[in-house]
Structure formats: C-alpha cells, structure tokens
Amino acid sequence: MNRTAPLLLGITLLLIAATYGLLTRVRDRQTLGAPAVRLTPVPLISADGRITRTNSVFLPMRVPGFEARPGVVTDMELAGLPPDTSFGRQIYRSLSDEFTAQASVVLMGRDRTSIHQPDFCLTGAGWMIQSKRHDLVPLPGAGGRVLPVQRFDAVLNYSSPDGAARRLAGVYVFWFAADGEVTSSHTQRTLSLIRNLVTQGVLQRWSYTSFFAECLPGEEDATYARLRELIAATTPQFQRFELADRR
C-alpha cells in the first residue's frame, strides 16, 4: 500500500481549508474601492422600457463632430451579470459621414463576476477574432498621459435576405480601470484585484470600457483610427482618476 497517497491527500485538504479560511476572513473585512468612472443618477432603462438600475455610468452626450443617443443594455446582459453591476452605453454617429460606434462601460460592485474575458463579448455574438494587439492612445489635455488599450479585429459571416453569403468586419477596443490603475490586460487586472484584496483588504471596483465599430473588410485600420479619435475625445470626460501606463 502506498502510504504517501493519504499523506498527500491530507496536505491537500489542509491547504484547501486554509485557503478557504483566508478568503473568508478577507471577504468579511474587505472594503469596496472607489470607481474610476463617473456615475450619474440617470436610471438605466431596459429594451422594454423598465427601469432596471437607479443610476448609470456617465458617458458624454456632447462630443464635437458627433451626435449621441443612449444605447440599450440587453435583457441577456442584465440577466447574465450580477444585480450590483452598473452600466453605461452610448451610440456615437459622425455628423460628416456614416461612421457609427458603440461605447459601453460595465462597472462591478461587490460581485467580481461582473467583468469577464473580453473575448466572450465578441464570440458570444458570432464574431470571429482575427487579431489582437496592444496600443497607447494619447489623451489631449491630460498632461501627456496615454491610455493603454487592446484592439481586436474580428469578422462576422452572415447571409443576406436573398441568401447570399456576406462578411462584415469589426474593430473592438477596450481597457480596464480602477482607482489609480488602468490596464489593457485582463490578466493584469485580475492579479491587481487579488493583490489589493489580500494585502490591503480592498476590493477594487474595476470598470471595463469598450468601443466597437463595424466596417467593410479591409477598412479595419481606418476604422481604428476613427475610434482612437473618439476615445481621446470622450475618455477625459468620464474617467475620473490619474491615468498611468500599465500596459
């Protein structure tokens, strides 16, 4: 009989119990950090007209060269994310052409599952991610600071009403922010959350901001350039902490 197996099992169970005890003590003592985005008392309205939240994440309505209208948060999003999740959503349409982009913010509360892998947002809607890359977006009037972002290029195959095969391209740009921190890496965000929770007892209140625009295949770079301009024009209005390059 192998006598080491019961010993290893016992050690494993002790480690699991100790970890559970540590996480329980941390959870009981934790305080919720301040959000890195502005909140507004404007209620969130669902697609069927119901008030689902008493406040929203602020996104600017006045952006030079654009008209803005509130975007709809779907019932699937509301049902799939914790009830203490806050949302912000605006649709921006250029006044000079047909360029249109959706800006979204998801802000967690005490439930950390509000924010997930960015890949899920696109693949769940049928998009296929073709490339991923990191970039820095300069923010005007912010003392030379830059915003670390990640860019996904994706394609969507679909059929037109006459049955013909069609392909659409899309550019998805996102980043995460907490009080005093900003990163374009989901892994970096997760490690920071754990570190602050264990060492300081503070549950960082992370936000997940994304901008998305559709385009024709081959126009991804031009579309991304337009998104960079829109991000630079809007972000200083709703992100409320000192940005740092945490790429």
Image: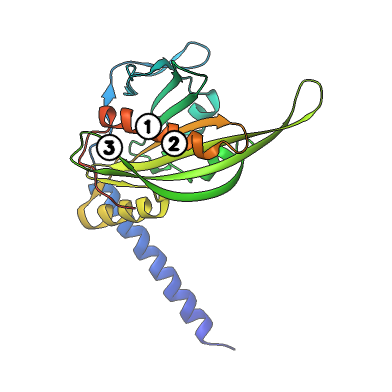
User: What element does badge 1 sit on?
Assistant: helix
For label 2, the crowd category at 10 Å Cα-Cα, with few meaning under 14, some 14 to 19 and many 20 or more, is few
The spot of residue 122 in percent (x, y) is: 56, 38
Q: Tell me the distance, in whole angstroms, between the alpha carbons under discs 1 and 2.
A: 7 Å
Residue at (33, 19) in percent of width and height: 64
Residue at the image position 20 percent from the left and 37 percent from the top: 142
Return the mark for residue 225.
Answer: 2
> Residue 187's x, y, as percent?
41, 54
Residue topped by disc 3: 139
Above or below 36: residue 129: below
Q: Nearer the viewer, residue 25 or 136?
A: 136
Question: Seen in the image, is 89 located left or right of residue 198?
Answer: right
**Residue 84, can we see it?**
no
Can you say which quadrant of the picture contains the N terminus?
Answer: bottom right
Say whether disc 3 or disc 1 marks the residue closer to the N-terminus. 3
Residue depicted at x 27% and y 52%: 197
The furthest residue to the right: 163
Residue 138 in view (yes/no): yes
- Image marks 1 and 2: residues in contact by CB distance under 8 Å: yes
In this view, the residue farthest toward the left is 143
Of the numbered discs 3 and 2, the one sitting upstream in the chain is 3
Mark 3, Cα crowd under 10 Å, few <14 / some 14-19 / many 20+, is many
- Mark 1 packing: few (<14 Cα in 10 Å), some, or many (20+)? few
